[in-house]
Amino acid sequence: QVQLVESGGGLVQAGGSLRLSCAASGRTFSNAAMGWFRQAPGKEREFVAGISSSGSLTYYADSVKGRFTITRDNTKNTMYLQMNSLKPEDTAVYYCAARKNLAIVTVTPGGYNYWGQGTQVTVSS
């Protein structure tokens, strides 16, 4: 079983930065591809960024490419999302997710077995 806990959300002005963290428990962290998703009110959950189990491959939604950076530290069982040049449309609840013993990222929420509780990110204009 894997448990995920996000932190680092908050309120920031447009153009600002935030760094989200996702701490994972469980011995299978280093075997699992992971991802960040977000969900705004009235909208479906959408893929933001993903990283392979080794950290060598990363993927981004077009809307965040060039502004967000996903990384992971398998020695600390932690994944990060550095968010720069934030825009009001980035406002959402951000969730981290992990696949079960699968090394490759998928952009489909259904492809992830474990989810955190979410952290709110609010970007004011």
Image (cartoon, helix red, strand yellow):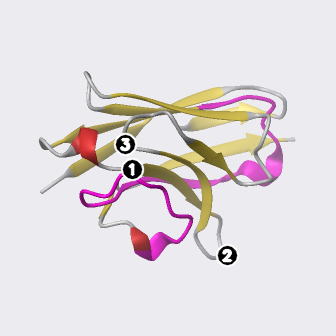
Measuring 26% from the left and 45% from the top, which residue is drawn there? 31
| Residue 88: image location, x then y, percent | 81, 48
Whichever of labels 1 and 3 marks the residue nearer the N terminus, that label is: 1
Q: Is residue 114 left or right of residue 86?
A: left
The residue positioned 74% from the left and 42% from the top of the image is 123
Query: Going from the N terminus, do you reach mark 2 or mark 3 first?
Result: 2
Residue 75 visible: yes
Q: Quadrant of the C terminus?
A: top right
Q: Of helix, strand and loop, which one carries label 3?
A: loop
Quarter holding the N terminus is bottom left
Mark yes or no: residue 94 visible.
no
Q: Nearer the viewer, mark 2 or mark 3?
A: 3
Answer above or below: position of 46 versus 49: below
Q: Residues within 10 Å of mark 2 (few under 14, many from 20)?
A: few
Q: Which residue is mark 3?
A: 53
**What segment is highlighted magenta in the picture?**
82-110
Q: Position of residue 89 (x, y in %)?
A: 80, 53
Residue type highlighted by circle 1: Ala
Determine contact: label 1, label 3, CB under 8 Å.
yes
Q: Residues within 10 Å of mark 3 (few under 14, many from 20)?
A: many
Residue 33, numbered circle: 1
For numbered disc 2, what is the local secondary structure?
loop
Instruction: Say what amino acid the circle numbered 2 marks.
Output: Lys
Q: Measured along the vertical axis of the image, is residue 98 above or below residue 106? A: above
Report the residue at 81% width, 30% height from top: 85
Q: Amino acid at mark 3?
A: Ser
User: Residue 73: x percent and y percent?
Assistant: 36, 25
The reply, left or right, for residue 59 in relation to residue 95 is right
In the picture, the disc for residue 43 is 2
- Which residue is found at the position 65% from the left and 70% from the top? 41
